Image: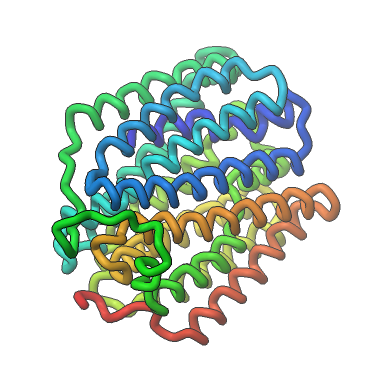
Amino acid sequence: MFMDISSEMIHALLPLFLTATLGASVAVVGIIEGIGESTAAIVKVFSGYLSDRLGRRKPLILLGYGLGAASKPLFALAGAPGVVLAARFADRIGKGMRGAPRDALVADVTPPEIRGRAYGVRQALDTAGAFIGPLLAIALMALLADDMRAVFWFALIPAGLAVLCVVIGVEDRAAPQEGAERRPPVRLADLRQLDRAFWGVVAIGVVFTLARFSEAFLVLKANEEGLPLALAPLVLVAMNVVYSLGAYPAGAWSDHAPPQRLLLAGMGVLSAADLLLALVPGLAGAFLGIALWGVHMALTQGLFAKLVAQNAPASLRGSAFGLFNLATGIAMLAASIVAGLLWETHGATATFIAGAILACVAAALVAGLGRTAPPPGD
């Protein structure tokens, strides 16, 4: 939660900082966002492998949160888009270092019958930070006469608190091992233990992510419809309030409902959000689409984490999260670059129409594959 507060204080203002202050194009914003997210995904593969090999999660979680905190001053000091890219790169390496071990640790310490709820709680806390951060950014923008660099400096405070929480509050739990000797999981013989159900989840996650490009485009859309610079963080506030309120109920629903049902619901909501953003003019249409974007995140993000944990052997759980995040991170890179180029050449409407079409393709893939995981509790 604290790290999300810090990151979203910056992220809520970053697209407009890049375009209005540093003179970057929307295509450059898409490239920076895509590179950042794909970097996190690639690093998650190795952090997941390492946490499985070591049988410990906390050291990598601490390293990841520490690097995330250390990257924050670069945003405040940036004088060109390249420096922002470097800061985003360092921040996302930190996210990658902590992401897979953290998600695997949740599964390590949670009984399978309430795992959906556990990921729902984790997602709700993440997302609470993701709307508290933009609210703080709005307040600080008012107090500091719209000085975005000063807001970025304040983001160091919650980042430091996040690191402190890991140091004093996180209890490590060794990942379950099938034998007495821990073996490096970076071997094809081990990866063959990940069966068709797991790779089905990966395939759906990739197509789904292609439809769900960076939230930076939501900020740019609202600004294009007339939202003032100082109120730009309201975009992420609106999305993440809905996301946070829905994450736990969606997690509880996933504990007793077929995963296919939730995935289809999430993809339908994403398609509706994209169509509203594409076709309904004005701030009212933009914010309704943004709220629905939050609904689809609540329905799907915790569910994907649960499905990865449910369809991977306990001894390869960190590796499985790393592989899933690698695949979806590469998809996010492609989606954000294409979204930025579409915006530059054909406008915002084309970007969101393309997202709606891809959400329908993902829904068709879910319907075609059927259930991608055993029933809850298996």
Expressed as whole percent of the image width and height from the top left, the position of residue 372 reads 40, 79
Does 24 sit left or right of 300 as displayed? right
State whether residue 19 appears in this view.
yes
Front residue (pair 202, 122): 202
Q: Residue lying furthest right in this view?
A: 345
For the point 14% across and 58% down, which residue is it? 180
For the point 16% across and 53% down, which residue is it? 109
Expressed as whole percent of the image width and height from the top left, the position of residue 307 reads 34, 68
Q: Assign the N terminus to one quadrant of the image.
A: top left
Q: Quadrant of residue 107?
A: bottom left
Does 350 sit left or right of 335 as displayed? right
Does 227 sit left or right of 191 as displayed? right
Q: Quadrant of residue 222?
A: top right
For the point 65% across and 63% down, which residue is it? 355
Expressed as whole percent of the image width and height from the top left, the position of residue 153 reads 49, 16
Is the residue 333 above or below the residue 147 in the image? below
Is the residue 106 above or below the residue 230 in the image? below
State whether residue 142 appears in this view.
no
Front residue (pair 17, 58): 58
Is the residue 130 above or below the residue 70 in the image? below
Q: Quadrant of residue 208?
A: bottom right
Q: Assign the C terminus to one quadrant of the image.
A: bottom left
